[in-house]
Image (cartoon, rainbow, N blue to C red):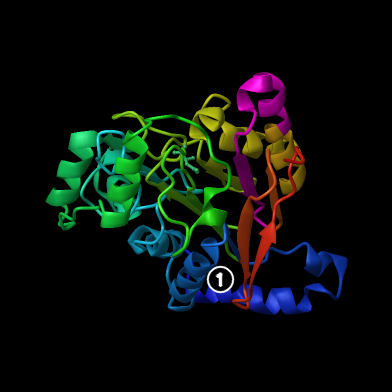
Amino acid sequence: MTTRRTFLGGMAVTGIAAGTAAQAAAPRATIVSTWDFGAAANAAGYAKMRAGGSLLDVVEAAAMVPEADPENHSVGYGGYPDRDGHVTLDAVIMDDAGGVGAVAALEDTVHAISVARRVMDKTPHTLLVGEGATRFARDQGFPKVDLLTPPAEQAWREWLKTSQYKPEANVENKRGPHAGPRGGALDHDTIGLLACDVLGRMAGACTTSGMAFKMRGRVGDSPQVGAGLYVERGVGGATSTGLGEEVTRVSGSARVVASLRAGLSPQRACEEVVRHIAQLRGDAIKGVQVGFLALSPRGEVGAFCLLPGFTYAVTDASGATVVLKAPSLFAA
Ligand code: ASP
């Protein structure tokens, strides 16, 4: 378990790292997450770390921020519903000691990531879905909450007029008070999080309401270990966002981690999987966004995507956060 001392130890290491090559190679405590809204999530994760939380506590606390944000229409409360009007959530949490918990098609529960953690901590299973996941959440004391907010319902009713599935890349960049409902669009954007400490231990989390107006019962990449998230001790971690079907069909995050194991840097590993998807899928991924984010146990970060616009947030052991644009394979 990571203690405050082990994570914050990274502050000293980071400060000294400029000095010698040996010191520069030491792990640097780092939290990374997908999209601009990852910055607020990272801040909550960092606060949890400073309070002495484990790495699992850190990624869970971070993931809970967008889950509770009604303005975020792609994660948790306020998320866009499926095409039948039900908001259904997918989430996974994992550490580098084989701990995994996940839920898919969870309903009426704000914090899917915390239910996923209970699956990990309290059951012999790794994934609960649908009615069983929702019943488990109630049994565990998570309050029943209607997740469909008026703006999300309005967007859904607008979408029903055409009921068209048409990918809209980088929806997150258009989000906000002036965005309005996007009828006819296939909105999606997940928060994926990775954290490492000064000992090089790691954990990750991924949580989403998935593709807006999806078919009832559709599960994306996000809660699937190896697709939306993968973490391996001593090797690194990866997480994904974008059109989940394109990530799932290549076990995207596991592929990134396999590349890290083979010696690629986090940046090269993200590039490799995105190129692979593009080559495999050709015209089928025209206009589709997929983005990967990777972290090594030493705090090295990589990110790459199909289309411009994928952003990610990096928080170092001093608590400083930067939001960066990932390079992309295609110009637009
Ligand atoms: N990957 C998520 C899904 O397909 C959505 C997203 O990240 O945009 O469910």
Nearer the observer, 222 or 153: 153
Q: Is residue 299 visible?
A: no
Where residue 24 appears, as percent x and y from the top left, is 80, 66
Residue, x 86% and y 71% (percent of image)?
Answer: 20
Q: Amino acid at mark 1?
A: Phe
Residue, x 47% and y 43% (percent of image)?
Answer: 188
Which quadrant: the C terminus? Answer: top right
- Tell whether position 292 is magenta: yes
Q: Is residue 21 visible?
A: yes
- Tell whether position 202 is magenta: no
Specify start and end residues of the magenta stretch as a single range: 275-298
Q: Which residue is mark 1?
A: 7
Q: Residue furthest right?
A: 20
Residue 57 in the figure: left or right of residue 247? left
Where residue 162 appears, as percent x and y from the top left, is 38, 31
Residue 98 in the figure: left or right of residue 85? right
Residue, x 50% and y 32% (percent of image)?
Answer: 166
Identify the image quadrant of residue 87.
top left
Nearer the observer, 332 or 279: 332
Where residue 222 appears, as percent x and y from the top left, is 45, 40
Q: Secondary structure at mark 1?
A: helix
Instruction: Note whether 242 is above or below 48 in the view shown.
Output: above
